[in-house]
Amino acid sequence: MTIGFGKSDNLAAAYGIAVSLTMLLTSALLFIAMREIWGWSMLAAGSVAGCFFVVDSAFFLANLAKTAEGGYVPLILAVLVYGVMWVWHRGAAAVSQRMHEALIPVPEFMALIAAKNVPRVPGTAVFPTRTERDTQPVMVWHVKHNRALHEHLFVLHLRVMSVPWVSFRDRIRIEQVAPNFWRAEAHYGFMEHPHIPELLARSKALGCTIDLSDVTYYVGHETVIRRDDGKGLPAWQERIFAVMERNAQHVSGFFNLPNDQMVEIGRQFAI
């Protein structure tokens, strides 16, 4: 990149646009923070952020004249980074939509278990899930392929809040949706690291009837493929998202699951 710029003036142009645009976006974020987090009025937030915005805009417009001299580099990089994040967001939303299309209500699922005389084995099965309602898809696939289900079921939905830390008393909420079938929602700040075994101990203390001495964690391993009906993502977006999905952090590391107690079930999602 240094050789491509040729001279330090072009490098300075790229640096100027990068810094001034960062300052401009920071002013916009300051306005959002004053309105949504600090609860300032529109007049007060607009007055304070507007002062910064005017100054930052002047710097940015002055540097914008040097776009052709090297300032295009941070702009291109910004577009590429935003594009990757946008594709990830669209892909994750498409996976979530496909997942919710196949959900089975808990009473219907438990009635199906009883009607088919599915064996109930001792122990506790824990299912981390993205869904906020109904039966977790991995649980359905587990019963379909293994033809058995644990006596105690614990479905956990994790929500990352827009704050760095969440107090211990607000960490988890649990409810019993069926006999020996518990659903929990855990809250973590974006600076915290989830730890499911600790959540199970906390749930036990809150009255959840699960057997902590015999726990098996069931997680899904998604493989993304393209939809054949033409209603999914464009092919290039699906390919980029599939690459990112394959290289994303494994769920066992994210949730701090013990590897010797985890079962991974593969599944495909056509998006």
Image: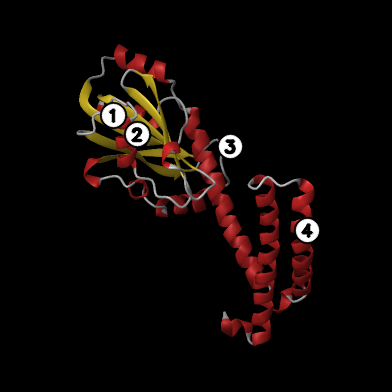
Residue matched to label 2? 127
Which mark is nearer the camera, 3 or 4?
4
Residue matched to label 4? 50
Residue matched to label 3? 231
Q: CA distance from mark 2 to mark 1?
A: 16 Å
Q: Which quadrant would residue 157 be assigned to in this image?
A: top left
The three-letter code of the residue at mark 1 reads: His
Which mark is nearer the camera, 2 or 1?
2
Which mark is nearer the camera, 3 or 1?
1
Q: Which quadrant would residue 156 be assigned to in this image?
A: top left
Quarter of the image where the N terminus is located: bottom right
- The mark nearer the N terminus, 2 or 1, is 2
Position of residue 268 relative to residue 8, above or below, is above
Structural crowding at the residue carrying mark 1, measured as other residues with C-alpha within 10 Å and reported as few (<14), some (14–19) or many (≥20): few
Q: Position of residue 132 (x, y in %)?
A: 47, 31
Considering the numbered disc 1 on the image, is that residue within a helix, a strand or a loop?
helix
Residue 179 located left or right of residue 82 = left
Res 154 label: none
Q: CA distance from mark 3 to mark 1?
A: 29 Å
Q: Position of residue 82 (x, y in %)?
A: 60, 57
